[in-house]
Amino acid sequence: MTTEDLKIKSINYRKNILKYIVGANAGHTGGSLSCTDILNVLYNHVLNVSPQNFSSPDRDRYVQSKGHCVEALFVVLADKGFFPEEDLNTLCKYKSHYIGHPTKKVKGVEQNTGALGHGLPICVGTAIAAKLDEKDFRVFTLMGDGELPEGSNWEAALSASHYKLDNLCAIVDKNSLQITAPTADVMNTDPLDKKWEAFGWAVKEVNGNDIDELKAAFAALPFEKGKPSVIIAHTTKGKGVSFMENELKWHHGVPNKEQYQQAINELDKSLTEVTA
């Protein structure tokens, strides 16, 4: 898939994320929009995962540690054919499997997540299992920068380095905002690259909303043989919608009718610019 194709997909994914969040009157809007390009490149350019091979022991594994941004994951999984997109009309409705966090009741979801700091430990265990079973599949997890202060992450980071898990890649969606304030004010984890390096990981930093930079980073995996890899993806919370970008209130804000229409108009304009 070309870079232009992926850019078009990202815009359409963002439109769908907003549509289903508005329909549910709930969701984590800003964080879902920040990680959209990362999920897009993963599922359409990197992962060996599809509805047809999801039961294969040789498939790549993806675990979304920042589970609260499940709206982005659901939209991408629907596009890949794991379930009919109209199922998302039940998002957050009574008896729906499409709740506000990833659950294995939804086809294509690898693990239940949502409590912060769980995705990386799960992936470390999965990557160790792959090594023991002499399997070639790779393991990926997407983490939010707001969940990094959880101690379980750093225990897992130590283990990944100790066991030389070069089949493991963590991506940090570094949008620099969390629910109550900038991450730097709540619990500063900078300099993030030096911390991961100190834990024995190979590090690359990219613009996490730039399709070409993401493609290049994933193509370079593993960054060093015998080391786990981490991509620090600098993103914009609320990416793609001018009045949501870098605004704390859109962490889980739901647009009203007028705001939703403005957002769709802006994304349609972006779509026109990409396809011109």
Image (spheres, rainbow, N blue to C red):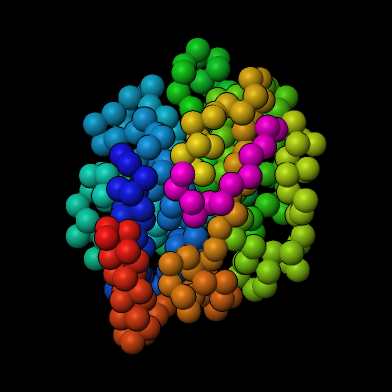
**12 in magenta:** no
- Compared across the picture, whether 259 is left or right of 213 comes to left
Q: Is residue 105 left or right of residue 147?
A: left
In front: 172, or 217? Answer: 217
**Of residues 263 and 65, the one drawn nearer to the viewer in this rendering:** 263
- Residue 188 is situated, as x and y percent measured from the top left of the image, at 77, 60
- The verdict on residue 208 being magenta is yes
Say if residue 153 shows up in the picture.
yes
State which quadrant residue 85 falls in. bottom left
**Residue in the picture at 75% in, 36% down:** 197
Residue occupying the point 68% across, 32% down: 202
- Residue 210 to residue 34: above or below: above
Residue pictured at 47% horizontal, 16% vertical: 135
Residue 3, given in percent of the width and then of the height, sits at 37, 45
* Quadrant assignment for the N terminus: top left
Question: Range of the magenta residues?
Answer: 201-212
Counting from the top left corner in percent of width and height, residue 53 is at 28, 29
Tell me: 32 left or right of 229: left
Residue at image coords 60%, 24%: 166
State the image coordinates of residue 191 (x, y, percent, origin top left).
Answer: 78, 51
Asked if residue 120 shows in the view, the reply is no
Residue lying farthest to the front in this orientation: 276
Number of marks in the rendered image: 0
Q: Which quadrant of the structure image shows residue 24?
A: bottom left
